[in-house]
Image (cartoon, helix red, strand yellow):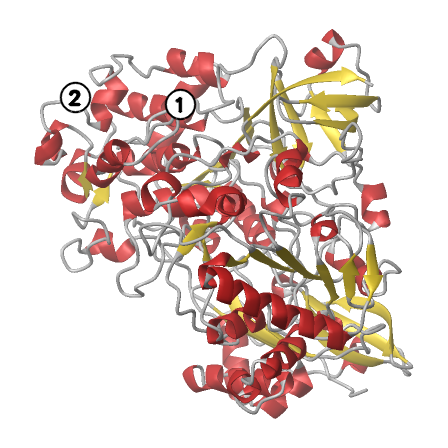
Amino acid sequence: MPQLNQSRRTFMKSAGALAAVAAAGGAASALTQPTEALGSKREEDAIAWSMCNVNCGGNCIFQWHVKDGKIAYMETDNIGDRDFQARACLRGRSMRRWVNSPDRLLYPMKRVGKRGEGKFERISWEEAIQLIHDKIQYTIDTYGNEAIYFNYGTGMYSTTGRNPSKRLLGMLGGFVNQLYDYSTHMMSASMPYMFGSDKKKGSVYSPYDNVNASSFSEAEAHSDLVVMFGNSPADTRMGGANAVWDFARVREAVNERGGKIVNIDYRLNETSAGHSDEWLPIRTGTDAALCAALCHEFVVDGKTDEDFLSTYCVGWDESTMPESAKGKGKSYKDYLMGTGYDKIEKTPEWASKITQIPAEKIRQLAKDLESAKAPFVCQGWGPQRHSNGEDTARAISMVPIALGQIGLPGTNTGQREAEPPTYLVGALPFKNPIKTKLPVYQWLNAIDHGSTMTATNAGIVGADKLGSDIKLLISYAGNCFTNQHGDINKVHEVLSDETKCEFILVWDTVLTDSGKYADLLLPDAMRAEQMNMQTQGYSEYYTGVTVGGPAQEAPGECRSHYDVCADIAETFGIREQFTEGRTQEQWIEFLYNEGRKKHPEMPTWDEILKQGVYKKELPPSIGLKDFRDDPVAHPLGTPSGKIEIYSESLDKLNDSWELEKGEEIHAIPVFWPGPEGYGEVTDEFPLYCSGFHYKSRTHSSFGFIKELDEMNRQQAWINPIDAKLRSIENGDKCRVKSPVGEIEIEAKVTPRIIPGTVGIPQGAWHDADMNGDRVDKGGCVNTLTAYRPTPLAKGNGPSHSIIVQITKA
């Protein structure tokens, strides 16, 4: 087992520290320090570096302490200035329990019971690889490559991620790829109609790209007011390499400046609880109504930036409308002032009835925004994860747009804080000959009736229609068949019908609820059990790379994803084409060195093997700064080159797409309740319900770790007013029922949630007798969510738009 030295982070905040680094011979090798000097190493230990790689975005640093070839304990980052330590959160610190769990999958297994029963028998790797070969070949020969779909997942994946399977499938003729993701589905689809895509990159729009959004470090430097819509880094992005640490510095700086932070959420989340400025409780799913009322007040108070709106925007008022929409009362200002299509003035009193925020509070927030020199408005991904999420995401951005507070120091575009713009190393490359992309939330429909799905009724991109029903489904490191999808009972009905999807391959480390639907279940080696490399995540605003491992051998017959795919490639006679003569370790070295060509300041390969970690400071980023400085030289990727408050493209889609009854696509970001949103409660289901991210899990990852469950129990949050009406006390076992399912869960009676709404932590593992009453004893919120893709994105908006009744069990 190699001895790998630790190194300090290779950047410091002060100019003096940076000068010292340069004098020492450059950032790549500066300030290295052996572990012994830190008192963190036992004499007999060896250390292997790694990073946490579940999808919270942090990628915090691990040091695996190894004794006699086995991980003895894990230590996180303890080197360098505390401001830059990538220290793991409570989830990451429990990773050894995952790696060495008695629940690890150890052998390839083939299904012997009904799909969903979780009954398997052990088979050899040779049999498993031949079975995969046969099923892929049969599917291609019988239905074509568009019958193959690689499902979305965010689990603890190996150093090469999902790309080995995608690389292999691409060489075999391709597969239907994913469009968008479960995290940002509605934003990713709707925001390009407002801000455009990045023309320089020629890429799909990213709602947290540094071109489109500002970094928290920019707020730290200049902001005097931070307004956060449903954004809680302390819940979603914990850890020293994560956005919660950026936010902590923002909070200190803003408060020192005499400013404040306002957190708008239906519950007093961990971020809001950690600072004492202001929590504005809001009825879940009604953020767009609040934003309309704020913008209404800007107009009434004469605080809108009319020069900015006329120069940089389309659709603010009649004078900025495109010719096709003039004279029809379709502008956003008409909508606000009651001269638009619905003839309702969006006053604070109007919004108060919808949002449950008092009108005087709305007016005060408007005045705070108007008087702020540099307001930083941002949103998490919860508000857009509603059935009306496409409008909500754009509506939040209207707050800084109306004030002209975009592209300036200390401001943001209303989107989530920016991700780092630089990834130092690339991933295993693949090419997919098939250009057809399926919105990720549509895969279940594609199994059920894929051949009838088109661009206009299902949001298919890259083709006019889907060429086939999905017949072969692959999941790698994901629990999105059931647990992280919508309407688990409906998923069960579709997947258990073997005449629909004919073969399901699941690759994972433990048996998830989704894994129970596998026809073939493969045991993956974890990152700690192979050489691994990971560039910094998309959260804290720096960039870096970690290389290390393996810390121990994989248990049983677990194998790396890459090695198995290479063996499958051999059965098709393309092993050499797949590997290009490289082992996984050689690919890692190759990809690292390719990154170093672009970033020569990085350590050499031998140096990174010794020091394990390299980090690089990034300057703050201001979203849309180039556009603000010169809109002619730097136009946006919209048809007009401007911010399109009114989108002709969306207006045309509303007329041309085949929408479900009651669905609408709006040209401007209106408040539209959406299915199971505001006003949809009934006598049978009188409460609104929403999921939220929870400290004990990243989605469903870590959901089987007993110690985390004990520290953070799965509980339904309910306000004391609602609890008293139902004779529910704190700790009572309760039943929560929606139109599509029912769960059993403990009650958390707390004033930290707004009356009329129940909050349920998402990601708890589904646990129900699917041949019996189907009541989920695990308390998984997606047992309650309807499966109804949103109008524009065809996304998972119903994740947080639920109506329920809660009763004492």
Q: Is residue 571 above or below residue 354?
A: below
Quadrant including the N terminus:
bottom right
Checking the image for residue 329, the label placed there is 2
Residue 301 in sight from this viewpoint: no
Return the residue nearer the eye: 714 or 460.
Answer: 460
Q: Of helix, strand and loop, which one carries label 2?
A: loop
Relative to 795, 243 lies left or right: right
Relative to 219, 165 lies left or right: right
Checking the image for residue 289, the label placed there is 1
Return the residue nearer the eye: 556 or 436.
Answer: 436
Q: Position of residue 773 (x, y in %)?
A: 78, 27
Quadrant including the C terminus:
top right
Query: In the rendered structure, are the residues bearing label 1 and label 2 in contact, judged by CB atoms less than 8 Å apart?
Result: no
Q: Position of residue 479 (x, y in %)?
A: 66, 51
Q: Is residue 632 above or below residue 588?
A: above
Residue 106 in which image quadrant: bottom right
Q: Position of residue 348 (x, y in %)?
A: 38, 15
Residue 109 in which image quadrant: bottom right
Q: Of helix, strand and loop, which one carries label 1?
A: helix
Amino acid beneath label 2: Gly
Q: Is residue 595 above or below residue 149?
A: below
Q: Position of residue 55 (x, y in %)?
A: 61, 56
Checking the image for residue 439, the label placed there is none
